[in-house]
Amino acid sequence: NAGVTQTPKFRVLKTGQSMTLLCAQDMNHEYMYWYRQDPGMGLRLIHYSVGEGTTAKGEVPDGYNVSRLKKQNFLLGLESAAPSQTSVYFCASSSLAGGRGEQFFGPGTRLTVL
Amino acid sequence: AQSVAQPEDQVNVAEGNPLTVKCTYSVSGNPYLFWYVQYPNRGLQFLLKYITGDNLVKGSYGFEAEFNKSQTSFHLKKPSALVSDSALYFCAVRDRGGYNKLIFGAGTRLAVHP
């Protein structure tokens, strides 16, 4: 049981380049989330999904797009990277059961945009 | 507006001494509260949660947290700190918008000195 995995672990981009971050979970969770972590700001929600084929905006969605074509995968895309998107990105998942469960986090992707 | 505050950027404690990491929240109704820990270069790990019931919640690694409704606080505690407890700690409250979304505090860095 791998839990939540993220690829890649590290990436360096130049301004204007694009990339996709992949998140996968093997816990059959309905809910998935993408966060960014910046020093002194905690975790901020970028986008989330409540099921296959659905996505919704979080607190800081600008400059990002997401897709959830399969229940176990949640992709985060940067179409034209900017230095302000330098951050550590975390994916998380949560179960619908009980409606009040905790989130399970992946190990993170450290992204630097030059 | 819903929010979580962690008033201390850093807490320093000697090994063997008790530790407290503070958290206050602002949310209408009954809150669902969580503590997570992040070790260097790792994702967040769930420590404990308060949903309802006993105000003293016990969690992983000997940690506990006390829910105080009148003071809108949920402080994390441990009777005897270990050097290995040194990490970044996040308090979170469940977003009343549903889908197990969480609102995180900015984090508190705990440093336990030998």
Image: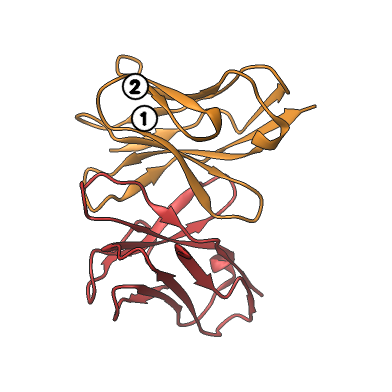
Chain colours: A red, B orange
Judged from this view, the residue extending furthest toward the right is B114
> Which subunit holds the residue at mark 1?
B
Q: Is residue A108 above or below residue B67?
A: below
Quadrant including the C terminus of chain B? top right
| Residue A12 percent across, percent down from the top left | 65, 77
Residue at horizontal 49 percent and vertical 59 percent from the top:
A36
Residue B55 image position (x, y, % from top left):
33, 19
A69 relative to B78, above or below: below
Q: Which residue corresponds to the image point at 52% horizontal and 47% vertical from the top-left?
A: A41
Q: Residue at x 66, y 75 (%)?
A: A114
Tag 2–tag 1 contact (CB < 8 Å):
yes
Task: Kindly indicate whether the residues beneath marks 2 and 1 are on one polypeptide chain.
Answer: yes
Residue of label 2: B72
Crowding at dot 1, Cα within 10 Å, few <14 / some 14-19 / many 20+, comes out as many
User: What chain does mark 2 sit on?
Assistant: B
Residue at the extreme front of the image, as rendered: A1
Element assignment for label 2: loop
Q: Earlier in the sequence, mark 2 or mark 1?
A: 1
Residue A61 image-quadrant placement: bottom left
Q: Amino acid at mark 2?
A: Thr
Of the 4 image quadrants, the one containing the N terminus of chain B is top left
Q: Which mark is residue B74?
A: none
Q: Mark 2 Cα within 10 Å, few/some/many (few <14, many 20+)?
A: some
State the separation of the CA atoms marked 2 and 1. 6 Å
Residue A3 in which image quadrant? bottom left
Hey, what amino acid is under mark 1? Answer: Tyr
Q: Which residue is mark 1?
A: B25
- Is B98 situated above or below B25? below
List x then y, in percent, for residue A108. 55, 63
Label 1 secondary element? strand
